[in-house]
């Protein structure tokens, strides 16, 4: 995960680009299948993607990612039309493409390319 200074984090973004949607929040768990089962049972969410190490749950238009700490940091994910400007994009198992950066305080941010780009 590359660390970006406050000025560089915001200078990359086009000032006319509005980040009007959080794609997802990611929380850590050591047992993704068990956590996904609990969330779907108690909160009536849908599973968009799941394997043994990662799951994405949909709560209406809000997504929660369940991640194993060794694989992904806890983070917030934003879709950005110029995601590649933040770093090299990696294609994930669910078809999304993204990179991770850290804000000046060390918080992890996943910058996702819009689907189909």
Image (cartoon, grey):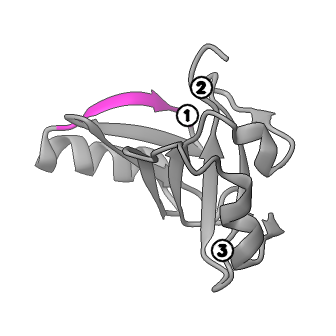
Residue furthest top as drawn: 116
In this image, 46 relative to 114: left or right? left
Task: Give the label on residue 51, or none.
Answer: 1
Measure the alpha-carbon separation of dots 2 and 3. Answer: 25 Å
Q: Nearer the viewer, mark 2 or mark 3?
A: 3
* Residue drawn at x 80%, y 36% as measured from the top left: 90
Q: Is residue 65 above or below residue 30?
A: above
Toward the viewer: 13 or 35?
A: 13
Disc 3 is placed on an element classified as loop
Instruction: Find residue 102 and report its horizontal and vertical position in percent.
Output: 70, 70
**Residue bounds of the magenta highlight:** 45-51
Q: Can you see residue 70?
A: no
Instruction: Find residue 46 and report its horizontal and vertical position in percent.
Output: 26, 30
Disc 2 is placed on an element classified as loop
Q: Is residue 72 above or below residue 96?
A: below
Toward the viewer: 39 or 82?
A: 82
* Residue drawn at x 57%, y 27% as measured from the top left: 114
For the C terminus, which image quadrant? top right
Disc 1 is placed on an element classified as loop
Toward the viewer: 99 or 104?
A: 104
Mark 2 and mark 1 lie on one chain; the one further toward the N terminus is 1
Mark 3 and mark 1 lie on one chain; the one further toward the N terminus is 1
Measure the alpha-carbon separation of dots 2 and 1. Answer: 10 Å
Task: Bin the neighbour count of mark 3 within 10 Å (Cα to Cα): few under 14, some 14-19, many 20 and up.
Answer: some
Q: Is residue 62 above or below residue 109?
A: above
Q: Can you see residue 33?
A: yes
Q: Quadrant of residue 18?
A: top left
In this image, 1 relative to 54: left or right? right
Q: Which residue is mark 2?
A: 94
Q: Which residue is mark 3?
A: 103
Q: Nearer the viewer, mark 3 or mark 1?
A: 3
């Amino acid at each position: 995960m590359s660390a970006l200074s406050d000025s560089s984090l915001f200078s990359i973004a086009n000032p006319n680009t509005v980040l009007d949607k959080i794609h997802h929040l990611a929380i850590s768990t050591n047992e993704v299948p068990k956590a996904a089962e609990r969330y779907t049972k108690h909160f009536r969410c849908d599973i968009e993607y799941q394997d043994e190490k990662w799951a994405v749950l949909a709560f209406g238009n809000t997504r929660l990612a369940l991640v194993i700490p060794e694989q992904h940091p806890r983070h917030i994910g934003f879709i950005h039309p110029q995601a590649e400007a933040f770093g090299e994009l990696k294609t994930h198992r669910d078809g999304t493409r993204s990179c991770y950066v850290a804000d000046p305080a060390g918080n992890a941010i996943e910058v996702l390319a819009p689907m189909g780009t």
